[in-house]
Image: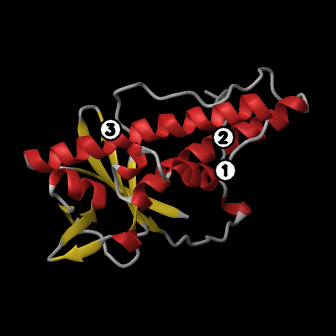
Amino acid sequence: MFGCQQVLIKSDRETQAILEYLCSESNDLYNCAVCYARQVWFKTGKIVSGFDLTAEMKTNRHFKAGYASSMQQTCLNVGEAFKSFKQLLAKSRKGELDQKPLAPKYRKSGGLFTVTYPKRWLKLVNNQIRFPLGNQVKAWFGISEFFLPMPSNLDWKPIREIRILPRNGAFYAEFVYPMQTESCPLDPSKALGLDPRSE
């Protein structure tokens, strides 16, 4: 089980421009991956996996426009959408659904999509998280990284990934970490019941 803490990113104009750029490229990559997966589905009836999409998209300019591992996560998201579609198709064929499921659709052109960074590619430096940008961004813009502050209420060690989430004209950082769950023994003799019909 995983927990997720969402933090509003308050950044300078340069970092804001970087976040917009990354999320825009992630959105375009998502649409390219959906296009490829849909074409494979319509022509062959096969569902491609997120790893197949990653291999196919490695030469795509939008994939190269970001850090490879974060762009891979975008391809894996498309793969998950098609995996769910495959499961719905199976239920539809068994008559368990009223409607025939549709293949995943494209995102709005010019929109923004989540960028996910696995923790192993991030570094904590003086309570600031370093996000790498990749060789292509460095070649184009002369920038190799950007930094965001680490929330004071979280521990760095258990963090699994950080997602940059665009929402309502702002950006949020989502910190994903494992949670320990405790089981509580239940005593049925101490249950409380209410009858809504009684006055």
Return the disc, 2 or 3, that comes first in the chain's sequence.
3
Could you tell me which residue is drawn at 29 percent across and 61 percent down? 135
Q: Quadrant of residue 117?
A: bottom left
Q: Is residue 168 above or below residue 142?
A: above
Q: Are marks 1 and 3 in contact (CB under 8 Å)?
A: no
Along the horizontal axis of the image, is 57 left or right of 148? Answer: right
Specify the amino acid type for callout 1. Ser
Could you tell me which residue is drawn at 42 percent across and 25 percent down? 108
Q: Residues within 10 Å of mark 3 (few under 14, many from 20)?
A: many
Residue under pointer 3: 24
Is residue 162 among what the camera can see? Answer: yes
Q: Are marks 2 and 3 in contact (CB under 8 Å)?
A: no
Residue under pointer 2: 82
Report how far apart the C-alphas of labels 2 and 3 lie in the structure: 22 Å
Work out whether residue 119 or residue 182 is closer to the camera in this orientation and state it. 119
Secondary structure state at the residue bearing disc 2: helix
Q: Are marks 2 and 1 in contact (CB under 8 Å)?
A: yes
Specify the amino acid type for callout 2. Phe
Work out whether residue 130 or residue 58 is closer to the camera in this orientation and state it. 58
Q: Quadrant of residue 96?
A: top right
Secondary structure state at the residue bearing disc 3: helix
